[in-house]
């Protein structure tokens, strides 16, 4: 009995560990509807389907509806492109929010409807680095100056003189007071 429970637990752990990479490798957001797959990456929303046959000139259209829009004609429309086995459309520059994607095939049938959430983009990190041609960089209030070898040696001499003076003072103070 105990061995069976142990095997069952370890089997579930292995199954969970095997499924983890699949969930981590998924796109930022993907929604599956009846016959369509909707995904978002940054401010781009894409829809893919294989449900629309070609009517000779096109596969149909997809529409991106924001909240408050009720029908296909009110949304941002994009033509489906691709092959007879896979059609897709995309919208760029989509602002953050919740949207509904509707795909209507060229023959008038609806391939699917799906809602998706577009997240706000992360704030880019700005980094500026300057590398000196020689010596040490120093500056005040955003000003940068490349100090030469003489200045660095002079600064090091001042630091060394200060260190020697501090040691001399502390040793002298440690001796008992003499008259």
Image (tube, rainbow, N blue to C red):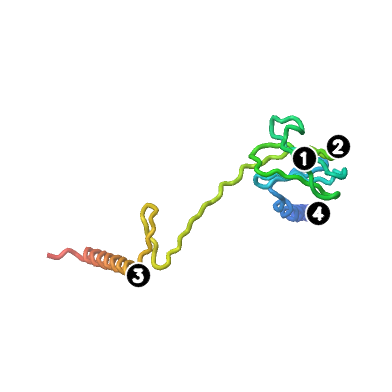
Tag 3–tag 2 contact (CB < 8 Å): no
Q: Return the residue at label 2.
A: 109
Using the numbered discs, state the Cα–Cα distance from disc 1 to disc 2 in whole angstroms: 12 Å
Question: Left or right: where does residue 17 sit relative to residue 53?
Answer: left
Mark 1 or mark 3, which is nearer the start of the sequence? 1
Using the numbered discs, state the Cα–Cα distance from disc 4 to disc 3 in whole angstroms: 75 Å
Residue 20, position as x, y percentages in the image = 72, 53
Secondary structure, mark 2, is loop
Secondary structure, mark 3, is helix
Mark 2 or mark 4, which is nearer the start of the sequence? 4
Question: Residue 62 shows which numbered tag?
Answer: 1
Query: Which sits in the foreground, 43 or 54?
Result: 54
Mark 2 or mark 3, which is nearer the start of the sequence? 2
Using the numbered discs, state the Cα–Cα distance from disc 4 to disc 1 in whole angstroms: 52 Å
Q: Return the residue at label 4.
A: 4
Residue 150, position as x, y percentages in the image = 32, 69
Secondary structure, mark 1, is strand
Q: Return the residue at label 3.
A: 149
Mark 4 or 2: in front is 2
Mark 3 or mark 4, which is nearer the start of the sequence? 4
The extreme left residue here reads 179
At horizontal 72% and vertical 37% (from top left) the residue drawn is 76
């Amino acid at each position: 009995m105990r061995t069976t429970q142990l095997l069952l637990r370890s089997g579930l752990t292995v199954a969970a560990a095997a499924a983890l990479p699949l969930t981590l490798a998924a796109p930022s957001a993907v929604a599956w509807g009846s016959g369509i797959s909707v995904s978002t990456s940054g401010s781009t929303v894409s829809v893919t389907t294989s449900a629309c046959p070609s009517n000779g000139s096109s596969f149909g259209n997809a529409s991106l509806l924001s909240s408050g829009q009720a029908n296909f004609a009110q949304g941002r429309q994009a033509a489906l492109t691709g092959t007879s086995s896979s059609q897709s459309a995309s919208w760029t520059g989509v602002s953050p929010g919740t949207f509904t994607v509707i795909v209507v095939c060229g023959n008038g049938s609806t391939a699917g409807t799906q809602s998706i959430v577009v997240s706000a983009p992360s704030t880019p990190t700005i980094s500026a680095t300057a590398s000196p041609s020689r010596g040490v960089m120093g500056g005040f209030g955003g000003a940068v100056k490349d100090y030469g070898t003489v200045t660095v040696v002079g600064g090091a001499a001042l630091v060394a003189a200060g260190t020697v003076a501090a040691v001399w003072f502390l040793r002298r103070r440690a001796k008992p007071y003499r008259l």
